[in-house]
Amino acid sequence: ERLPLADGAVVLPAYACGVADQLLAAIDSVVAQAPLRRMVTPGGQTMSAQMSNCGALGWVTDRAGYRYQATDPVSGRPWPAMPVAIARLATQAAALAGFADFFPDACLINRYQPGARMGLHQDRDEQDLSQPIVSVSLGLPMVFQFGGLKRSERPRRVPLNHGDVVVWGGPSRLRYHGVLTLKPGTHPATGDCRYNLTLRRAGR
Ligand code: MD3
Ligand code: FE
């Protein structure tokens, strides 16, 4: 099933359910090497979601700014390789949404516990904005905010559940988006949290 949200934005409901256990095992192996941590924004706020990365590049933020870098600032080592199960799912989902030959080099892992959220923002730290972004939701359900190209545009609320995959590209690539505060609950796959994998082509 393919649900168009807007031009260039497509929801693939439950698309990742069949491989969710593989994805969660892959996440466990990544975070064993590059532990989840709360990063600090350039403005000095500690983010409420915990983050880690895998792939050639990882997204980081600190007082110096937002950027992609090849090494984990905590360990100084390269980020763990991107597990094949994650990369393959992203390439396949992007193709279904009309974006052929999407080969992500960065996978940001976001872990939300109850009370965590992400405010409205744009993703614009990547070099080639013609490349889409693929996001995979695992575990507890949450409400995604899907805005316009201006922050002032009131966002739509889109509920996302375990296994849902969303592809954002074309005219939707620079839309403002965010995540409402996660409500407490328990999910058989993840327990008390939600994971989001955000797959991007960050470099060239
Ligand atoms: C819409 N993460 O890490 S993924 C992020 O659920 C981020 O963790 C959220 O936003 C999360 O930057 C949302 C969905 C997403 C990602 C990129 C987008 C939606 C997007 C880019 C443009 C429009
Ligand atoms: Fe984002």
Image (cartoon, rainbow, N blue to C red):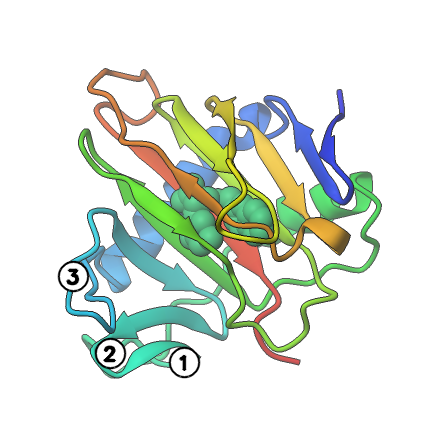
Q: Is residue 204 left or right of residue 194?
A: right
Q: Is residue 168 left or right of residue 146?
A: right
Q: Earlier in the sequence, mark 3 or mark 1?
A: 3
Query: In the rendered structure, which amino acid carries the disc numbered 2?
Result: Pro
Describe the element under mark 3 as helix, strand or loop: loop
Q: Are marks 1 and 2 in contact (CB under 8 Å)?
A: yes
How far is disc 3 from disc 2 in space, using C-alphas? Answer: 18 Å
- Between residue 83 and residue 38, name the one nearer to us: 38
For image coordinates 18% across by 75% down, the residue present is 74
Residue 110 spot, x, y in % from top left: 34, 48
Horizontal and vertical percent for residue 14? Answer: 59, 22
Q: Secondary structure at mark 1?
A: strand
Type of amino acid under label 1: Gln
Residue beneath the point at 42% across and 43% down:
178
Q: Is residue 140 shown above or below 99?
A: above
**Which residue is under mark 3?**
45
Mark 2 falls on what kind of element? loop
Q: Which residue is mark 1?
A: 69
Residue at the disc numbered 2? 73
Q: Residues within 10 Å of mark 3 (few under 14, many from 20)?
A: few
Note whether 37 is above or below 134 in the view shown.
below
State the separation of the CA atoms marked 1 and 2: 9 Å
**Disc number for residue 164:** none
Q: Is residue 97 left or right of residue 63?
A: right
Q: Please give the name of the residue rendered at 31% of the width and 59% of the height, measured from the top-left corner.
A: 52
